[in-house]
Amino acid sequence: MYIFRLSLFLLTTTVASAQLQLQPLNAAVLRGSKARFNCSTTQPPSVMNWMVNGRLVITILEASGVFNFTDRFSAQDFTTPGDYKWEFIISNVQRDDAGEVTCQVLGGAPQLATLSIQESGSVEIVGGNQTKTEGVQTEFQCRAVGWFPEPSMSWSVNGVANSCNRSSVAQGNLFNSICTLTVTAVKNSSVQCLVSVPALSTPDTSTVFLTVEKFAKRDQTVLIAVTVAFSAAALLFLIIYAIFFFCMRRKKKSSYQEEIRRARIQSQNRTPSTENVQGQDNRGYIRDGHDGHTTDGVWYTNHSDKHQMTGIFFDDAHRKHRHMTIV
C-alpha cells in the first residue's frame, strides 16, 4: 500500500511538472469540415481527456490508446521522443460544436481553446459582364448570401484592390450582404468581388469583365453627318420656299398690273370722247319748215323710220337740228 501511494504521488508530481500545450487556442472552421487540435506534453501522460463544451468525448490511455472514440470524434498519436503529442479531430463540425475545446491530462490543469463554426454562402456580381462607353461611370453590385459571421467584402479591378460600401441583413443565423463598386470606364478591365470569413484560407470570388468602347469619334462622325444632312435639307427647303414665294409674288404682281391695265382700258372705253359727245353730222337733218313731224321732241321724217333726237346746234341763217340716231 505504501509503495502504491508513493508511485501515485511520483506520477502526479511528474505529470504536474510536465508542460502541457494546446494548439491552436482559437480555431475557425467551416460547417461540415474538420477541426483539429494538438495537445502535447514533455512527459508521457497516463490519461488524456478531450472535452467539447464540458462534455467528455475522447479518453486516451497510455497503456491501451484511444478509448470511446466515435465517427465524429477521434484522436491520432503524433508522439516523438521527448514530445508526447496527440491530435484531436472533430469531423463534420456543426454549429453546436462551437465553443470551448479542453485538453486535460491526469493531475494537470486543463488547457482551453475556442472553436468557431462559420459558414460560407454564395457570391455573385449582379448583372454579369458590362459594356460601356469610355468615360461613363459604371456600377457593379456584389451580393453575398448565406454567410456566418457577417463576411468581409472587397473589390479588385485588374488586380488593384478597391474598397466598397457594404450593407448586411441578418436572416435567421446567417447574413446576406451587398457591396457596390462605382468606377469610370477607362479601359477593358477584369472586375472581381472577394468575400471572406476567417475560416476561409482564400476568399470566395466572382469575376466579370468590363468592355470599354471608344465611340467618341464614331459618334462625332455620325453627328456631323446628321447635321450636314439636316442642314442640306433645311437649305433645300429654304431655296424651294424662296423660289415658290418669288414666283407667287411675281404672279401676284403681274395679276395686279394686268388688273390695272384692264381697269384703265375699261375706263377709257367707258369715257366718251368729245367727238362722240358732240355726235356726228347727220346728213338727213331738216330745216325749219321741214315736212317731218315731231312727237315729244323726237322728229320723224318721211325718209327714215329711225328716231331722231333734236340737237342744240344752230347756224346764222337757219336753225338746224342735229340728230342722234338711236338704233
Image (cartoon, grey):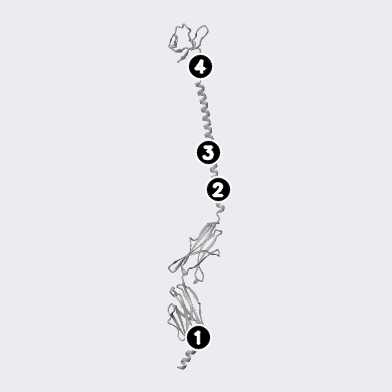
Residue 286: percent from left, percent from top: 48, 8
Circle 4 or circle 1, nearest the eye: 1
Q: How far apart in space, not on screen, are marks 3 and 4 (Cα)?
A: 54 Å
Q: Which residue is mark 4?
A: 277
Separation of marks 3 and 1 at Cα, in angstroms: 114 Å
Q: Secondary structure at mark 2?
A: helix
Question: On the image, numbered disc 3 is attached to which residue?
Answer: 241
4 or 184, which lies in front?
A: 4
Q: Are marks 1 and 2 in contact (CB under 8 Å)?
A: no
Gap between marks 3 and 2 measured at Cα: 24 Å
Residue drawn at x 48%, y 91% is 7
Q: Residue at x 55, y 52 (%)?
A: 219
Q: Give coordinates of residue 3: x percent, y percent.
A: 47, 93
Amino acid bearing label 2: Ala
Q: Secondary structure at mark 1?
A: helix
Cα distance in 3D space between marks 4 and 2: 78 Å
**Mark 2 crowdedness (10 Å alpha carbons): few <14, some 14-19, many ≥20:** few
Identify the element where label 3 is drawn: helix
Mark with earlier residue (4, 1):
1
Q: Quadrant of the N terminus?
A: bottom left
Foreground label between 3 and 4: 4
CA distance separating discs 4 and 1: 166 Å
